[in-house]
Image (spheres, rainbow, N blue to C red):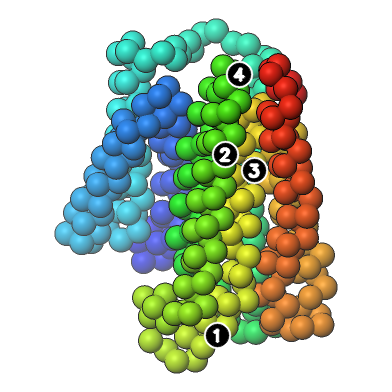
C-alpha cells in the first residue's frame, strides 16, 4: 500500500483494519459497563477516548501533517485508551459481572450471537442504504443529488443517534424488570421511551418542513444543491420517527430474550425497502428514490406495531414470567 499522497484513504483503512479488535472492544466494553449499572462511568470512558482523539487529531494532522494516516493512528490510540479503562474497571473486581477468559459455554455463545444478530443487521442497514441510494441517485439524478443525499443523511443522523442511544439505554432496565417480574416498570419504561422517540421524531420532521434552510445552511451555500437537499429532506424524512420506533422495538425484543423477533424487525426493515427501491424510481424518477424508504417504513410499520403491541400486552395479562 502506497502511503500519503498516492492513497491517503487506503492508509486510513489499513490502519483501522489492523486495529479492528480494538475498535470492536472500544464499542462493546462500555456497553458491558453500562449493563453493570454504571452508565455514567461508561459514558465517561467514551468521552475520555473522544477527547484524546481530538487532541491527537490536532497534533498528528495539524502539527505533524500526517493527513488521514495520522487520523487513523489518533483514532486507534483513543480507542485503545477506552479499552484499557474498561479493562481496568473489570480487573479491579468492583463489578458485579465477572469475566472469565478460560471458561467457555457454547450454548451461551450461541445465545449471544442470536440476540446480537439484530444489532448486526441494524448496523449493516446503514451501509446498505447508503450504497444503494448513491447508486440510484447517480443513475436517476446526478452528483448534486448524491451530495444532497449526504446532507440529508447527516441531518437524519442527528435523530438516529439520539433514538439509537435512547433505545440502547432502555435495554438494561427492561431486562432487569423482566427478570424481576416487575412488569409495571417494564410498561412504564417502554411507554416513556416510545413517547420520547416518536415525539422527538415528529418534532424534527416538523422543524425540517418549516425551517429546512437552518439545516442545509450548515453544509452548503450553493443554491442548486440547497434546493435539491431541501426537496430530499421533505420527501425522504417524513417518516423519520418510524425509524426510531424500529430501533426501540428491536432492542426491546433483545431485552426480553426474543432474538428471532428482534432479527425480524432489523432484517425486515432492510428487505422491505428492496421492492420500493426497484419499482418507484422506474415510475417516479428521482422522487421515487427519495420516497422509497419512508413509504416502505409505513408498510413495515403495519407489521411491527401490532407485533410490538401484542408482546407488550402480555405483561398486562399475566403475573407469570414472560416466556419466549
Most distant residue in the bottom direction: 223
Image spot of residue 239 (x, y percent): 63, 65
Residue 168 versus residue 255 in the image, above or below: below
Locate residue 87 relative to residue 166 in the image: left or right. Answer: left
- Kindly report the distance in space between the C-alpha atoms of the residues bearing marks 3 and 1: 33 Å
Image spot of residue 196 (x, y percent): 50, 51
Q: Residue at x 64, y 43 (%)?
A: 249
Which residue matches tag 3? Answer: 249
Residue 82 versus residue 145 in the image, above or below: above
Q: Please, what secondary structure does the residue beneath circle 4 have?
A: loop
Nearer to us of marks 3 and 2 is: 2
Task: Tell me if residue 22 can be seen.
Answer: no
- Kindly report the distance in space between the C-alpha atoms of the residues bearing marks 3 and 2: 9 Å
Which residue matches tag 1? Answer: 228
Locate the C terminus by quadrant: top right
Which residue matches tag 4? Answer: 181
Residue 20 versus residue 33 in the image, above or below: below
Task: Pick the residue in front: 282 or 65.
Answer: 282
Image spot of residue 183 (x, y percent): 61, 25
Label located before the other in sequence (4 or 2): 4
Which residue matches tag 2? Answer: 190
- Kindly report the distance in space between the C-alpha atoms of the residues bearing marks 1 and 4: 51 Å
Label located before the other in sequence (1 or 4): 4
Task: Pick the residue in front: 7 or 270.
Answer: 270
- Kindly report the distance in space between the C-alpha atoms of the residues bearing marks 4 and 2: 15 Å
- Kindly report the distance in space between the C-alpha atoms of the residues bearing marks 1 and 2: 37 Å
- Kindly report the distance in space between the C-alpha atoms of the residues bearing marks 4 and 3: 20 Å
Amino acid at each position: 500500500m502506497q502511503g500519503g499522497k498516492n492513497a491517503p484513504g487506503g492508509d486510513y483503512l489499513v490502519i483501522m483494519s489492523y486495529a479492528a479488535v480494538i475498535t470492536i472492544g472500544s464499542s462493546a466494553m462500555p456497553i458491558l459497563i453500562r449493563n453493570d449499572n454504571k452508565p455514567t462511568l461508561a459514558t465517561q470512558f467514551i468521552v475520555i477516548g473522544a477527547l484524546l482523539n481530538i487532541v491527537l487529531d490536532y497534533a498528528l494532522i495539524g502539527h505533524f501533517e500526517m493527513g488521514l494516516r495520522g487520523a487513523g493512528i489518533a483514532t486507534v490510540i483513543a480507542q485503545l485508551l477506552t479499552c484499557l479503562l474498561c479493562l481496568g474497571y473489570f480487573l479491579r473486581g468492583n463489578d458485579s459481572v465477572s469475566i472469565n477468559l478460560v471458561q467457555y459455554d457454547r450454548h451461551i455463545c450461541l445465545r449471544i450471537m442470536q440476540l446480537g444478530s439484530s444489532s448486526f443487521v441494524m448496523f449493516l442497514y446503514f451501509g446498505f442504504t447508503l450504497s444503494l441510494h448513491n447508486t440510484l441517485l447517480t443513475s436517476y439524478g446526478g452528483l448534486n443529488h448524491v451530495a444532497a443525499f449526504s446532507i440529508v443523511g447527516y441531518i437524519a443522523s442527528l435523530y438516529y443517534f439520539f433514538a439509537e442511544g435512547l433505545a440502547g439505554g432502555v435495554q438494561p432496565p427492561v431486562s432487569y424488570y423482566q427478570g424481576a417480574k416487575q412488569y409495571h416498570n417494564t410498561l412504564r419504561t417502554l411507554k416513556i421511551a416510545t413517547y420520547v422517540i416518536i415525539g422527538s421524531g415528529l418534532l424534527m420532521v416538523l422543524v425540517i418542513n418549516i425551517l429546512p434552510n437552518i439545516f442545509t445552511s450548515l453544509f452548503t451555500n450553493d443554491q442548486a444543491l440547497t434546493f435539491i437537499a431541501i426537496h430530499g429532506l421533505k420527501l425522504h424524512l417524513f417518516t423519520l420517527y418510524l425509524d426510531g420506533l424500529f430501533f426501540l422495538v428491536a432492542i426491546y425484543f433483545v431485552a426480553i430474550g426474543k432474538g428471532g423477533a428482534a432479527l425480524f424487525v432489523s432484517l425486515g426493515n432492510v428487505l422491505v425497502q428492496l421492492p420500493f427501491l426497484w419499482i418507484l424510481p422506474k415510475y417516479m424518477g428521482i422522487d421515487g428514490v427519495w420516497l422509497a424508504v419512508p413509504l416502505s417504513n409505513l408498510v413495515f410499520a403495519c407489521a411491527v406495531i401490532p407485533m410490538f403491541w401484542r408482546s407488550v400486552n402480555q405483561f398486562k395479562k399475566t403475573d407469570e414470567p414472560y416466556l419466549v
